[in-house]
């Protein structure tokens, strides 16, 4: 009998009944960002989160999560990755991308952040729903300080927001650049963005972050082509985590974030020309610990 909590074996019909992201979750209307109409996307709903998926890139353009810090449940990691049956397999970056190398299937919606509910059963089902390949993108397996910071941001902001409101809305995705290097039939994203929104002193507030795994190599396409030909790991670099003006994240990602940029707690002017992967800009705060996070002027 199939594990009731695992996504393996879940039908398209069952997934169509998932509630997805709730724009009114914070008590303030915060709709999920949408891309311009000339960019092909498909909305996929899961427990507690939704994915705006780009079939042309085989990755999410936006994920949106409701996080209820007051009802988080510690559950065992299900770790049963599956293709979403609502999409053709060739439109998803599936197992072949991660086979026989050290690439991680990096969660966009973090499993622990989704594991909440009125009951443990709800939390388990929500945690299991984060293991669809539509919620993953390749990341370097090196687990260094920069990535630890990235993984700890939601918990840190949840603790901060607890003084005011135990709920967060978390938006995250890879930065899907046209020049991302090819590997095994996909283009590997080199940067990831995250925006966390919450209510502070009765008002909507938000902060934005960027994770950069850009390798420092002179000929990036050639290095990735060699990795694909030999089955080696692509030459991704060590993680660097930044707090970034949300307006810059909108420019870098191509995702409209006007509402959240207007309530950004980082007192910095957006860059006139946001930098390319591997570069930084004035106003970007490189985080060495969670104590470096700026939550207001």
Image (cartoon, rainbow, N blue to C red):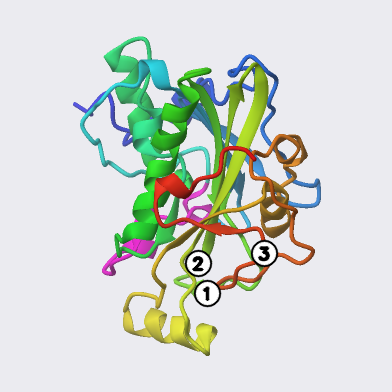
Q: From the image, tell me which residue sits under label 1.
A: 182
Residue drawn at x 68%, y 59% is: 252
- Residue 93 shown in magenta: yes
Q: Earlier in the sequence, mark 1 or mark 3?
A: 1
Give the labeled residue for mark 2. Answer: 188
Q: Which comes before the other along the chain, label 2 or label 3? A: 2
Question: Residue 179 appears at what percent x and percent y?
Answer: 63, 73
Residue furthest front in the image? 297
The magenta stretch is 88-106
Residue 201 in the magenta stretch? The answer is no
Residue 229 higher or lower than 96, as above or below: below
Question: Is 276 on the left or on the right of 86, as rendered?
Answer: right
Nearest-to-viewer mark from 1 and 3: 3
Q: Badge 3 is on which residue? A: 282
Q: Distance between the Cα atoms at labels 1 and 2?
A: 6 Å
Disc 2 to disc 3, C-alpha distance: 26 Å
Q: Are marks 1 and 2 in contact (CB under 8 Å)?
A: yes
Q: Secondary structure at mark 3?
A: loop
């Amino acid at each position: 009998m199939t594990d009731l909590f695992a996504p393996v074996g879940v039908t398209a019909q069952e997934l169509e009944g998932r509630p997805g992201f709730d724009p009114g979750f914070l008590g303030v209307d915060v709709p999920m960002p949408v891309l311009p109409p000339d960019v092909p996307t498909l909305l996929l709903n899961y427990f507690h989160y939704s994915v705006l998926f780009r079939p042309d890139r085989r990755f999410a353009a936006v994920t949106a999560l409701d996080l209820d810090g007051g009802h988080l449940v510690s559950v065992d990691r299900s770790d049963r990755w599956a293709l979403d049956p609502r999409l053709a397999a060739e439109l998803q970056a599936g197992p072949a991308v991660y086979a026989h190398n050290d690439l991680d299937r990096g969660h966009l919606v973090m499993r622990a952040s989704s594991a909440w509910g009125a009951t443990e059963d709800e939390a388990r089902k929500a945690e299991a729903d984060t293991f669809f390949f539509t919620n993953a993108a390749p990341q370097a397996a090196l687990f260094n300080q920069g990535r630890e910071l990235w993984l700890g941001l939601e918990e840190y902001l949840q603790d901060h927001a607890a003084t005011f409101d135990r709920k967060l809305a978390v938006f995250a995705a890879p930065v899907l650049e046209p020049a991302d290097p090819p590997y095994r039939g996909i283009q590997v994203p080199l940067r990831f963005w995250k925006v966390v929104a919450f209510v502070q002193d009765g008002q909507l507030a938000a902060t934005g972050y960027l994770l950069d795994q850009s390798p420092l190599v002179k000929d990036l396409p050639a290095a990735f082509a060699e990795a694909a030909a030999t089955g080696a790991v692509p030459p991704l670099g060590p993680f660097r985590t930044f707090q970034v003006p949300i307006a810059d994240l909108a420019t870098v990602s191509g995702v409209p974030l006007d509402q959240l940029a207007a309530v950004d707690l980082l007192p910095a002017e957006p860059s006139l020309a946001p930098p390319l992967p591997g570069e930084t800009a004035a106003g970007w705060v490189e985080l060495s610990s969670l104590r470096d996070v700026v939550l207001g002027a």
